[in-house]
Amino acid sequence: MTLIVQKYGGTSVGSVERIRNVARRIAQSQSLGHQIVVVVSAMSGETNRLIALAHEIQKYPDPRELDVMISTGEQITIALLSMALIEIGVKAKSYTGGQVKILTDDAYTKARILKIDENRLRKDLEDGYIVVVAGFQGVDESGNITTLGRGGSDTTGVALAAVLRAEECQIYTDVDGVYTTDPRIVPEARRLKTITFEEMLEMASLGSKVLQIRSVEFAGKYKVKLRVLSSFQEGGDGTLITFEEDRNMEQAIISGIAFSRDEAKITVLGVPDRPGIAYQILGPVADANIDVDMIIQNIGHDGLTDFSFTVHRHEFVRTMSMLKDKVQSHVGARDVIGDDKTAKVSIVGVGMRSHVGIASKMFRVLAEEGINIQMISTSEIKISVVVDEKYMELAVRALHKSFDLDQIP
Ligand code: ADP
Ligand code: ASP
Ligand code: MG
C-alpha cells in the first residue's frame, strides 16, 4: 500500500461545500488503495481576518499570542474535514500540530520544523484512518504554539511526506499546476508539466506564492516527489517538481517569471567610502531582525559613495526611522531616502547557464516599454530588476511575450 500526503489550501476548503468536495476526493484516493495523510490550511481569508483582529488590539501584536490565535484557523478545518469524511463513511481523525508533535524552533510567526513524531500517525494509518493534520503550525520545546510563516501549510505537507517517506506529496490548490507566471496577471500563462527543483526554489523565493519556499527546500533536501494540482479539476497531472537530471533536453531558456510587490528600496546617500561602511549600515538592520534582499554599493567618487538595498515593504517605515535615528549621523551620511512603491520582477530558467544575451534581451524589452530599471541583481539561473510598482504588470506581460513563454517550446 502506498502512502500519499495531500495538502489542500485555503480556497479549496473555503466553504462547507468545498470541504465536502475535498472529502469526496480523499475517499476516492483511498479507494484506489492508498494510505492518506491530509494537511489543510485555514478557510480562505481566515488567517488574514485573525491577523487584522490582532492589529486592532496591538499595533505590533505580541508574537507568541499572535501564533496562539492564527493557528486556530487550521484547527477548525481539520475538524470540519474529518467530520465530512466520517459523514460519508470514511474513518478519519484530526490532529493539531502540537498533538502530532511537530516540533519547531521558537521563532514565533516564522518557526522552522525541527522534528516530527510519526508514531501516532503511523498507528492510525495502520488502523485504516485518514489522518488530517493542521498545516502551518507546531510547538516549540516548551510547548508554546508556533506558526511557520504565511503559506506554511505547504511546508507541513512536504515535511510530513519526508518523515513518512510518502510516495508523493500532492499540493492541491486553486490552479492546476505551476504556470510560466501567475495566471491571474497573464491569462496566456502556460502550465508547466515539470519544473526543476532549482527553478521552483527561485520562483518561490522571488514571489510566486504557489509554493512556500521552505516546502521546496524540504523537498530538495529529502528528495520528496512534489506535485502541484487543482482541487477543483479531476484527473490532471498538474506540475511535477523534478531534479534536473530527469528533465528532457528540449527546454526553454526561461521557464518562468516571478514578481513581488513587497519591495521597498532604501538609499543611504553620500557615505564615506571606507572599510566597514556596509557593516555599519546593515549591522543594525540585521540586529533588528529585518531581512535585506538586494544590495548595491556604487563606485566611490570624491571619497563618498551611495549605498542602496531593499527590504520587505512592511519593514520600510521601521528601517527608515532606524537609519535616520541611529545610522545616518553615526556613519556621516548626507541623507537617507526611500521608496516603498517599488516591485521586483524576475526571470528564471536553468537554460540561462548555457545561453548568453538573456539579460540584455530583458533590459531591451523593458526599455521598449519605457520602464526604468532601478536595481538589478543576477544569479546563475535568474535575473531580477526593481521597477516602479505601477509598471510591474506591464513588465511581466511584456517579458512573458518576448520570451515566448506563451508558446510550447
Ligand atoms: P493555497 O491557498 O491553495 O495555498 P495560494 O493562493 O497560496 O493557494 O497559491 C495559489 C496561487 O498562486 C494561485 O491562485 C496563483 O494566483 C498564484 N501563483 C503565483 N505564481 C504562480 C505560478 N507561477 N503558477 C501558478 N500559480 C501562481
Ligand atoms: N493559513 C496560513 C496562511 O494563510 C497557512 C497556509 O494557508 O498555508 O498563510
Ligand atoms: Mg499557499
Image (cartoon, rainbow, N blue to C red):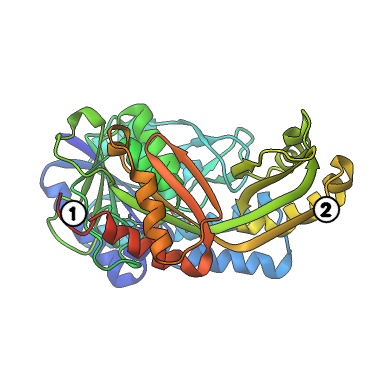
Which residue was labeled with disc 1?
Answer: 27
Residue at the image point whose x is 48% and y is 37% from the top: 102
Between 223 and 187, the residue placed more toward the observer is 187
Residue at the image point whose x is 79% and y is 47% from the top: 270
Task: Give the SS element for disc 1.
Answer: helix
Between 390 and 43, the residue placed more toward the observer is 390
Earlier in the chain: of badge 1 and badge 2, it is 1
Q: Which mark is drawn over residue 294?
A: none
**Residue 131 spot, x, y in % from top left:** 32, 45
Between 21 and 379, the residue placed more toward the observer is 379
When the figure is inspected, residue 124 is found, relative to residue 185, above or below; the finding is above
Which of the two marks, 1 or 2, is nearer to us in this view?
2
Q: Amino acid at mark 1?
A: Ala
- Using the rendered image of the protein, determine whether residue 208 is visible from the camera's viewpoint: no
Between 204 and 300, the residue placed more toward the observer is 300
Kindly tell me whether mark 1's CB lies below 8 Å from ligand 1: no
**Residue 187 spot, x, y in % from top left:** 27, 68
**Residue 232 spot, x, y in % from top left:** 22, 64
When the figure is inspected, residue 396 is found, relative to residue 246, above or below; the finding is below
**Residue 138 spot, x, y in % from top left:** 52, 42
Q: Residues within 10 Å of mark 2 (few under 14, many from 20)?
A: some
Assign ligand 1 to one image quadrant: bottom left
Q: CA distance from mark 1 to mark 2?
A: 59 Å
Image quadrant in which the N terminus is located? top left
Q: Which mark is drawn over residue 324?
A: 2
- Using the rendered image of the protein, determine whether residue 34 is visible from the camera's viewpoint: yes
Quarter of the image where one finds residue 398: bottom left
Residue at the image point whose x is 77% and y is 35% from the top: 273
